[in-house]
Amino acid sequence: MNIIFFGPPGAGKGTQAKIIEEKYGLKQLSTGDMLREEMANKTELGLKMKSLIDEGKLVPDEIVIEMIAAHVNSDECSKGVIFDGFPRTIAQAEALEKMLADCNKKIDHVIELKVDDNLLDARIEKRAKEEGRSDDNIETLKKRLAQYRSYSADVLPYYKAKNMHTEIDGMKTIDEVTAQIIKILE
Ligand code: AP5
Ligand code: MG
């Protein structure tokens, strides 16, 4: 089973991915986490991408596509993948479809976590204290939200047209959000 979690910054994609990963033996692939690891290790790529990420901009398609391609057909992904924060563009969505199809796999569900903007501020502020992400401040959050509005207007219709998209209420408690996801998967 391969699932995409789609939603704005702070929607709960990572939180839910970790819960669902455990429950179903799937593998979470988060392009955001991979990029933060590159930055933490001060690799050439990480240093190059830092300014884009801190500005709340998308990194180039070919970089994230390559990151996903390096993992998606590995043994640890054999039971399926939860794509967290990928794809964010049509080019990424098409590349994903192709790399899965090459191994007779497909996306089963695209789950959109809907959360009002006013709730996201508080969540990001809380996480800023817990994790210290360099893009977790109100100024960058505004830019990330603007990006989200722009790219979701491309990507969501793409999956809606394929009847793969389901929307859930991401404003409920973490357990209640998990329950909505399980209902879709079972
Ligand atoms: P990425 O790391 O993907 O960030 P994001 O999409 O902005 O999402 P977040 O990780 O901020 O939110 P989340 O939905 O995972 O929320 P979480 O579960 O942590 O991307 C970062 C950057 O990398 C991008 O801006 C871009 O520059 C680049 N990038 C990444 N992927 C890319 C791609 N494909 N293409 C191009 N560029 C890319 O929850 C947040 C907080 O809320 C936590 O504290 C959590 O405990 C709390 N919380 C969660 N759920 C609930 C709940 N139900 N109730 C109360 N609190 C909750
Ligand atoms: Mg996340």
Image (cartoon, rainbow, N blue to C red):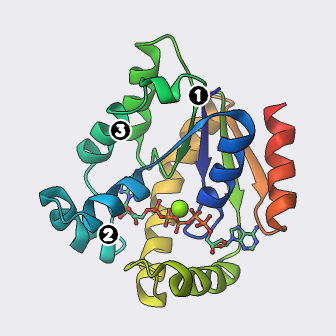
Can you give x and y, in whole percent of width and height, for residue 41 in the image? 24, 63
Mark before the other along the chain sequence, 3 or 2? 2
The residue that disc 2 covers is 53
Q: Residue at x 60, y 70 (%)?
A: 10
The residue that disc 3 covers is 91
Can you give x and y, in whole percent of width and height, for residue 157 in the image? 58, 43
Count of marks placed on residues: 3
Task: Name which residue type carries label 3.
Answer: Ala
Q: CA distance from mark 3 to mark 2?
A: 19 Å
Query: With respect to residue 160, does 178 lie above or below?
Result: below
Q: Residue at x 87, y 59 (%)?
A: 176
Quadrant where the N terminus sits is top right
Q: CA distance from mark 1 to mark 2?
A: 28 Å
Query: With respect to residue 43, does 183 lie above or below?
Result: above
Give SS at disc 1: loop
Between circles 3 and 2, the one closer to the viewer is 2
Query: Does the image show residue 123?
Result: yes
Quadrant where the C terminus sits is top right
Query: Does the image show residue 58?
Result: no
Which image quadrant for residue 9? bottom right
Task: Name which residue type carries label 1.
Answer: Gly
